[in-house]
Image (cartoon, rainbow, N blue to C red):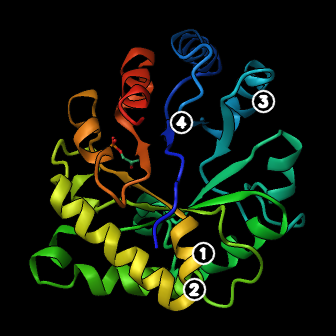
Amino acid sequence: MSKYRKKIIAGNWKMNKSVREAQDLTDGIIRELAGYRETDIVLCPPFTSLKVVGDLLVDTYIKLGAQNMHWEPSGAYTGEVSPNMLRDLFCHYVILGHSERRAYFNETDKIVNTKVKAAISTHLVPIMCVGETKAERESGQAKDIVRRQIEEGLRDVEGDLKTMIVAYEPVWAIGTGLTATPDIAQEMHAHIREILAKTKGEATAQSIRIQYGGSVKPENAAELFKQPDIDGGLIGGASLEARAFAKIVEAAV
Ligand code: 13P
């Protein structure tokens, strides 16, 4: 069974851009992609720029996303931001379980699972990130690691998962210039869809969009996005420049 899945390109700005720079970048992206409707487009600035970027995106086709969140709606969690606060700023999407959060902030599969549940119950679309490290790939464990991340991340998640996004981001490809070849990426994406089919049913697996992330650039985007199970990209470095980001979006038809 195969089903049409609209491609989705998201820019993960990570910890980059002042408020002013975020406005300029957003203006540039809006200009570059004015009237473009062929793919879904999401910008994920740091928390400090969500409001200004969101204001600029009103009346455009581009949606707003956050890079992380806490799972509780409010409370004594100094320094954290809740799902409700993100909704309040008109975020549609939230990146969860990015490998940088897992590596530097001790986010476990259990935490990611709790956040996915909180996102869905707050009507935020989770972009749940999975991916193996270089050592895990070299020791032949890549598929098992990704299976565990998917199974645990989505354990007991209720409700309609068809609109959620999974992002496959091999850690060895992030910010390194080492992109996974289209074949390597496709193989893992097909594996992910198989796990989703087994755990959540075929119809859900065919609807969930699986993004690839890791050194996607205008030069390699089209080949990656041509693969049958690659439904778009989660873009780091190349999303910080309007023209480069627009070219990647345009490569995803
Ligand atoms: P780069 O595109 O900079 O490799 O980053 C990928 C990423 O981590 C997106 O979430």
- First in sequence: mark 1 vs mark 3: 3
Compared with residue 104, is residue 194 higher up or lower down, i.e. above or below? below
- First in sequence: mark 2 vs mark 4: 4
Say if mark 2 contacts mark 4, CB within 8 Å.
no
For the residues marked 4 and 1, what is the alpha-carbon distance in whole angstroms? Answer: 20 Å
Instruction: Assess disc 2: are there few (<14), some (14-19) or many (≥20) residues with their C-alpha within 10 Å of its C-alpha.
Output: few
Ligand 1 lies in quarter: top left
- The percent coordinates of residue 37 (x first, y second) are 60, 27
Amino acid under label 4? Thr
Say if mark 3 contacts mark 4, CB within 8 Å.
no
Compared with residue 29, is residue 73 higher up or lower down, i.e. above or below? below
- What residue does disc 2 label? 201
Label ID, residue 204:
1
Label ID, residue 51:
3
Specify the quadrant of the image occupied by residue 201: bottom right
For the residues marked 1 and 3, what is the alpha-carbon distance in whole angstroms? Answer: 33 Å
SS assignment at label 4 = loop
- Left or right, 213 with respect to 35, comes to left
- The percent coordinates of residue 193 (x first, y second) are 42, 75
- First in sequence: mark 4 vs mark 1: 4
Observer-side mark, 3 or 2, equals 2
The residue positioned 28% from the left and 28% from the top of the image is 218
The residue positioned 28% from the left and 61% from the top of the image is 171
- Left or right, 141 with respect to 200, comes to left
Image quarter (top left, top right, bottom left or bottom right) of the C terminus: top left
Say if mark 2 contacts mark 1, CB within 8 Å.
yes
Amino acid under label 3? Lys
- First in sequence: mark 3 vs mark 2: 3
Label 4, ligand 1: CB separation under 8 Å: no
- The percent coordinates of residue 135 (x first, y second) are 15, 74
